[in-house]
Amino acid sequence: MDDFDGRVAVITGGASGIGLGLASKLADEGMKIVLADIETDALEKAAEMLRSKGSEVIGVQCDVSDRSQVEALAITAYEHFGNVHFLANNAGVVSRHKAWESPEDWDWVIGIDLMGVIYGVQSFVPRMLASGEPGHVINTASTAGLLAFPGIASYNVSKRGVVALSETLHHEFKKTALSVSVLCPGMVDTNIGTSERNREGIDFQPDPDQFVVRDGKENLTPDEVAEIVIDEIRQGIFWILPHKHYGEQALEQAKRRISGDGPVMPHIDR
Ligand SMILES: NC(=O)c1ccc[n+]([C@@H]2O[C@H](COP(=O)([O-])OP(=O)(O)OC[C@H]3O[C@@H](n4cnc5c(N)ncnc54)[C@H](O)[C@@H]3O)[C@@H](O)[C@H]2O)c1
């Protein structure tokens, strides 16, 4: 997809971070925007910010871990704009726990980071195919979709699933008007370290030892990531890796599948 002007984009997790950066750049490209998020106040503020730049935007409150809410999002988007050409399955959260701990964390993370993306594909792709118009799906995975980081097992498993789903779509979109990319960033300065702010039944206290290190050496801003995404979608790139060293690391890990050696610890450039 290389022509965004006048077309319609749906972005989940669009009220903050990478989703908001992407929505803002797509709006600059002339797209009409459906911004979806669970966090109502942030969603209203983000939609207002985009409208103040002259963009046509609707904000839709949606919990992507609820299949019926994602279906309702699709119905709203099509009722309002008549079509959807670009879907960013981007909403995501992270939780720190050992692999054998915290069943409730597993449910929460997999519900949003993996099932949320699957629901997005199931509700939007049939409609996008039926329109016959060119369209694009981008799924936000992570470097954790390529390499397993200790302490965030539910996130690694979800993101590996998003990579697998995206690869499958790549094959299944052959001979259709749709294309797909998978976004695998390293560190980006966003609010993901305070993911639990949106978690029901949690008395959220910001964690000074949060997972995402802001201002790290390799950190990018959401705007920088969004620019890379749009540029690489224009070039037809499937694997969007804003931090290339993770691609190199993934390649080295893959060679160990042949030698039979266990994985080495992934390296973050702090
Ligand atoms: N920040 C990083 O370093 C980094 C690196 C790799 C991948 N990612 C991925 O980028 C994506 C965006 O995260 P971010 O870093 O911009 O974080 P963020 O917290 O700034 O933004 C995530 C957005 O998702 C929304 N959200 C959370 N739960 C939701 C739900 N159930 N339904 C709908 N919306 C929900 C939040 O309200 C928020 O607006 C995530 O999938 C994340 O895993 C982030």
Image (spheres, rainbow, N blue to C red):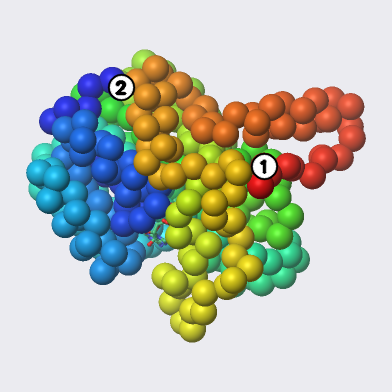
| Ligand 1 in which quarter | bottom left
Q: Is residue 8 visible?
A: no
Crowd tier of the residue under label 2, counting other residues whose Cα lies within 10 Å: few below 14, some 14–19, many 20 or above: some
Residue at the spot 16% in from the left edge and 33% down from the top edge: 30
Quarter of the rendering containing residue 8:
top left
150 sits left or right of 58 in the view: right
Residue located 32% across and 49% down the image: 20
Q: Left or right of 217: which side holds 78?
A: left
Neighbour tally class for label 1: few under 14, some 14-19, many 20 plus, Cα within 10 Å? few
Residue 71: numbered disc: none
C-alpha span from label 2 to label 1:
32 Å
Judge left or right: residue 175 versus residue 153: left
Among the two numbered marks 2 and 1 on one chain, the one whose residue lies closer to the N terminus: 2
Residue 13 at x, y = what percent?
36, 54
Question: Which amino acid, by three-letter code, is at mark 1?
Answer: Asp
Q: Residue 228, can we see it?
A: yes
Q: Residue at the location (49% across, 42% down)?
A: 220
Vertical relation: 123 (above or below) 99: above
Residue under numbered circle 2: 1
Q: Nearer the viewer, residue 57 or 78?
A: 57
Q: In the rendered image, which residue does mark 1 sit on?
A: 269
Q: Residue at x 42, y 30 (%)?
A: 228
- SS class of the residue under badge 1? loop
Task: Give the secondary structure at mark 2.
Answer: loop
Question: Do the residues bearing badges 2 and 1 touch, measured as CB atoms within 8 Å?
Answer: no
Using the rendered view, name the quadrant where residue 255 is placed.
Answer: top right
Q: Amino acid at mark 2?
A: Met
Residue 265 in which image quadrant:
top right
